[in-house]
Image (cartoon, rainbow, N blue to C red):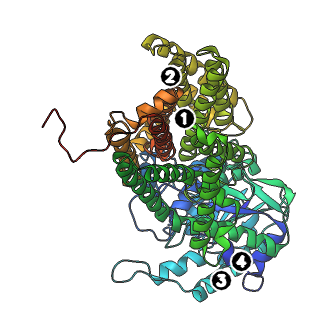
Amino acid sequence: MLLIGVPGLRWGDIRRTGTPNLWKLTGRAAVGTLSVKTVSGHACPIDGWLTLSAGQRSQLRHGSCGLPPAPAGTSVPGFAGMREDNARSKYGSKPGLLGDAVHGAGACTTAIGPGAAVGAADRAGRVDAYFPSADKTPADAWARCALTVADVDDVVRAYVDAGVDVNGHPVRVTPKVRAAAASAADAQVGRILKAAPAGTTVLLAGLSDNAGTERLHVAMAAGPGYGPRYLTANSTRTVGLVTLTDLTSTILRTLGVAQPKDAVGSPWRSDGRKSASVARVVRAMADRDTHARIYSRFVFPFYMVLIAAQLALYAFATVALRRRNDRRLAATKVLALAAGALPVASFLANAVPWWRSGQPALTLALLILAGVVVVTAAALAGPWRRSVTGPGVVVAGVTALVLSLDVMTGNHLQNCSMLGYTPVVAGRFYGFGNTTYALWVTGLIIAAGALAGLAAARWGDRRLVPLAVVVAAGVVALVIDGGPMWGADFGGIISVIPGFTVFAFMLTGRRVRPTRVIAVLAAGAVLVLGISFLDSLRANPTHIGEFWNELTSGDAGKVVFRKFLGMVGTFGNWKLSVIIVLGVGFLFFALLRPLAWRAAALHLAYERAPALRATLTAALVTTVVGMLVNDSGVAIPAMAFTVAVPLALAASVRALELAGREAPPRPERSEEPSASTG
């Protein structure tokens, strides 16, 4: 086994003429993009090597983001301190795991270059043989050990050599200097590949970031079991995408060494589809990195637009509700539906490769606007527009349907969408992300509530029929969100059970007694643990099944505590907090406050659509519980509010319109004094 680590190498660096060895390797290897997320947002070179060593996210907590230290003999200086620091980190990683596992199997390790020594070292910080560079490695050393690791640091060294300016900011490396560094790295890779014995499995990884923004990097695997195809792994379930922690697992599997439980990755494997020509492969892999990079530039401005849209809607609606003006109310309803459609429109925009445009910001804005217009027009076009909840149900139903189809067909819309997730951050690669789940489950609950109300009115049954609808919706939620093949969302299925329990009780007119809730929650806990147990029996369990393994091994407490700390930390996210404050404030001070004609707008909607109260309460309970059991915390209710509050406003306005048509006209004030006051 030969691992060539080229910290900072990206697919955009590989060219037919400038990097011929890498170009040739691409043609015969299984290829993919590599997510190098470690502990912090930026993966320094030594962080990448420590993560390889531990099989878990690791970092150098004390020191500069520079190159790894050169070994003294065969020992890495300061390795004991690195190991101790990471053992106390939130991931509790154990650098030296890879070296220990290889030694435990009776094999040895050879390291070429400082970073390689960090990656291959055992818990004592030692490798069996060390050479400072490829050109100083004797010919017989390449076949001496089962595992040889080589550090090719030319790309990242260009950034280290550039240094920082007087303000402490990294000096910009020009494209010409970077291209020269990539060519130098390519020459080293060529020498290493030529020296490697026949039959060697070769892995090549750009296992860290450079200075500047976080990016996706190069991953290749050549040799027995790998061909010109795309890489994937169970950790990502995405063709052409693997992670840094998977690298450790891949090495151990190739060497036939059992993977320790502290290593969290999944082995790389070739996808069944053949890759295209080298030029097309390089473009496709570089395009994925481009998408992630441009997404990172636009996600913050999008949240600002989202907050501004919510604020403008609530301000306009507050004025419109205080003054009985039909035109303003009609405009408020349209704006509310448009605001509720904005989240799903941001996902639909990803159906078009907007990031390839010469003006990606404008293209993305136009696509989102088009999605908002289409969904809003659909909500106002059919006969459902006459009912109180009809238009909002269309928006909610489209949201739930689009996200359901996406999660069942590979998450193409969620990946690097403005409200989705990105492989650079590496919080989630498949299934429902927490913010997406919040939007999806809110849409599902609103659609189910309207359907239950419609069914009750149609068949005149206030209990059995609505209960059947809610139970069916709850089963759909558990299957789609909790299914390992689709949503794979452990926290989501925990929050679905209490939310839909309250939904069923309120919709059928039963009191929400503590004993009933506790009984249902106990049954839900058994169900959740059963799903976790069954998933753990699979050859490649998701994190749902991993929770059972952690529970039985006694490690579940650490995972729960880490997620709790993550949840608490989200309260410092001012963008999400602003959305929640705006939504709650508008509910209490506008929709629930009596109007000039002596009725709160939302209460009028409740009277005309009795299922609406249960619907909104169920959405609130589901997302609040989701906040408490997920490390995304306040992001879950915040995203739910972006759909639920505008659609509640649209229903309230429609109720006011209907009430206004039925109420007798108010007498105009007279300038003359009345008889009683004259």
| Earlier sequence position, callout 2 versus callout 3 | 3
Q: Amino acid at mark 3?
A: Ala
Instruction: Return the x and y of residue 178 as percentages of the image width and height.
Output: 59, 83
Closer mark to the observer between disc 3 and disc 4? 4
Q: Assign a secondary structure to mark 4.
A: loop
Q: Amino acid at mark 4?
A: Ile
Relative depth, front residue between 513 and 546: 513
Q: How far is the residue under mark 3 from the one under mark 1?
A: 47 Å
Q: How far is the residue under mark 4 from the one under mark 2?
A: 56 Å
| Direction from residue 343 to residue 569 in the image, left or right | left
In the drawing, what numbered circle is on residue 491? 1
Q: How far is the residue under mark 1 from the one under mark 4?
A: 41 Å
Instruction: Return the x and y of residue 306 as percentages of the image width and height.
Output: 47, 57
| Earlier sequence position, callout 2 versus callout 1 | 1
Closer mark to the observer between disc 3 and disc 1? 1
| Earlier sequence position, callout 4 versus callout 2 | 4
In the drawing, what numbered circle is on residue 502? 2
**Quadrant location of the C terminus in the rendered image:** top left
Crowd class of label 1 (few under 14; some 14 to 19; many from 20; radius 10 Å)? many
| Earlier sequence position, callout 1 versus callout 4 | 4
**Quadrant location of the N terminus in the rendered image:** bottom right
Marks 2/3 in contact by CB < 8 Å: the verdict is no
Up/down of 435 relative to 294, above or below? above
Residue drawn at (54%, 29%) of the image:
494
Marks 2/1 in contact by CB < 8 Å: the verdict is no
Q: Which residue is mark 3?
A: 184
Marks 4/2 in contact by CB < 8 Å: the verdict is no
Q: Assign a secondary structure to mark 1.
A: helix
Q: Is residue 171 visible?
A: yes
Extreme residue in the bottom direction: 176
Q: Which residue is mark 4?
A: 14
Q: Amino acid at mark 1?
A: Gly
